[in-house]
Image: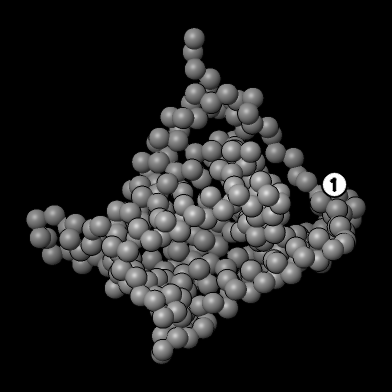
């Protein structure tokens, strides 16, 4: 019997099902690989090639990602197309109450931690900094080296077990209150409501023919989304390059190519995941949703 063809699956699910698992795998594989090997030691035959550590990490990441894409596509080839459905935009209603207030507090707190943490100082340096060129990871007063990667692995295992434990105990509190996809999606939905209006008005606007007012509203919304995404990408890179140094380079137009790439890459990922795919991420990208 012939295997089902991947093109029978909706295109967005094809892309998600291939790119995301391989992306996560590439992150883990890169972390393990470069914790054992210094990028400068991988240049063959002692060739005099000037490759920055950040460039080497990036190239290595994309090599692992490419291998994961090939593997994921092979899995997709034999996937039952009935597991997937065409995307339909969801317009969530505004809900009020105690749990909604708790959710808002959780989202504001987590976003605050993400954007403020790189600005904190500790003993004359950034409090939380993953210095890839120096292969040092600073977490307040703690300094970790690549050989300490085992501690990160143990932490990830503990986090995974905790996720199952707390979900079995009190429900899907992680998905509803703390998951990064939930946090950023809620932030983007809040901006959408402020610009386009409540649920009924947004549905009416999307169904209406193009007009000057509709185009202006959409341009404003996407401009705000893009600005927020760029801030998110800049903050992300600020965890790997001292953020004050990164800001100086940004305002003097002297950002390196790899720093620029990762800012734009992470900005694009945030813009796409939180602005457009939203629940698609939970349905087709989240491994925990697959377990459920």
The residue that appears at 63% across and 74% down in the rendered structure is 112
Question: Residue extending furthest top?
Answer: 1
Residue 147 vertical position relative to residue 93 in the rendered view, above or below: below
Report whether 219 appears left or right of 52: right
Residue 10: give x, y in percent of width and height. 62, 33
Q: Is residue 181 left or right of residue 210?
A: left
Q: Nearer the viewer, residue 84 or 210?
A: 84
| Quadrant in which the C terminus appears | top right
How many dots with numbers?
Answer: 1
Packing grade of label 1 (10 A; few <14, some 14-19, many >=20) is: few
Residue 13 image-quadrant placement: top right
Q: Is residue 150 visible?
A: yes
Where is residue 56? Give x, y as percent.
29, 60
Instruction: Say which quarter of the image contains residue 196.
Output: bottom right
Residue farthest bottom in this picture: 124
Which residue is located at x 27 percent, y 68 percent?
52
**SS category of the residue bearing label 1:** helix
Name the one closer to the observer, 97 or 51.
97
Residue 139 position in % (x across, y down) = 43, 75
Q: Is residue 62 visible?
A: no
Residue drawn where x is 77% and y is 65% of the image: 102
x and y, in percent, of residue 36 in the image: 25, 57
Q: Residue at x 42, y 40 (%)?
A: 69
Q: With 83 as the anchor, is 202 left or right in this view?
A: right
For disc 1, the marked residue is 207
Identify the coloring. one colour
Q: Is residue 20 above or below residue 174?
A: above
Question: Residue lying furthest left in this view?
Answer: 45
Residue 226 location, quadrant: bottom right
């Amino acid at each position: 019997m012939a295997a089902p063809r991947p093109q029978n699956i909706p295109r967005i699910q094809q892309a998600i099902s291939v790119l995301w698992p391989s992306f996560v795998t590439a992150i883990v594989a890169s972390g393990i690989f470069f914790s054992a090997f210094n990028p400068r030691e991988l240049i063959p035959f002692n060739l005099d090639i000037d490759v920055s550590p950040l460039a080497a990490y990036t190239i290595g990441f994309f090599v692992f990602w490419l291998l994961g894409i090939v593997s994921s596509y092979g899995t997709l080839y034999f996937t039952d197309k009935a597991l997937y459905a065409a995307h339909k935009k969801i317009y969530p209603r505004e809900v009020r109450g105690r749990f909604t207030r708790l959710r808002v507090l959780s989202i504001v707190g987590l976003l605050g931690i993400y954007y403020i943490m790189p600005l904190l100082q500790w003993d004359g340096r950034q409090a939380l900094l993953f210095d890839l060129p120096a292969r040092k990871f600073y977490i307040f007063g703690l300094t970790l080296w690549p050989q300490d990667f085992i501690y990160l692995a143990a932490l990830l295992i503990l986090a995974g077990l905790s996720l199952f434990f707390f979900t079995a105990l009190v429900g899907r509190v992680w998905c509803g209150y703390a998951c990064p996809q939930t946090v950023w999606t809620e932030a983007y939905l809040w901006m959408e409501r402020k610009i386009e209006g409540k649920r009924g008005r947004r549905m009416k606007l999307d169904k209406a023919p193009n007009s000057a007012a509709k185009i202006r509203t959409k341009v404003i919304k996407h401009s705000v989304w893009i600005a927020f995404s760029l801030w998110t990408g800049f903050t992300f890179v600020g965890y790997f390059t001292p953020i004050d140094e990164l800001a100086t380079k940004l305002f003097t137009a002297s950002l390196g190519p790899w720093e620029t790439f990762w800012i734009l890459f992470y900005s694009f990922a945030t813009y796409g995941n939180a602005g457009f795919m939203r629940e698609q991420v939970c349905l087709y990208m989240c491994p925990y949703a697959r377990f459920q």
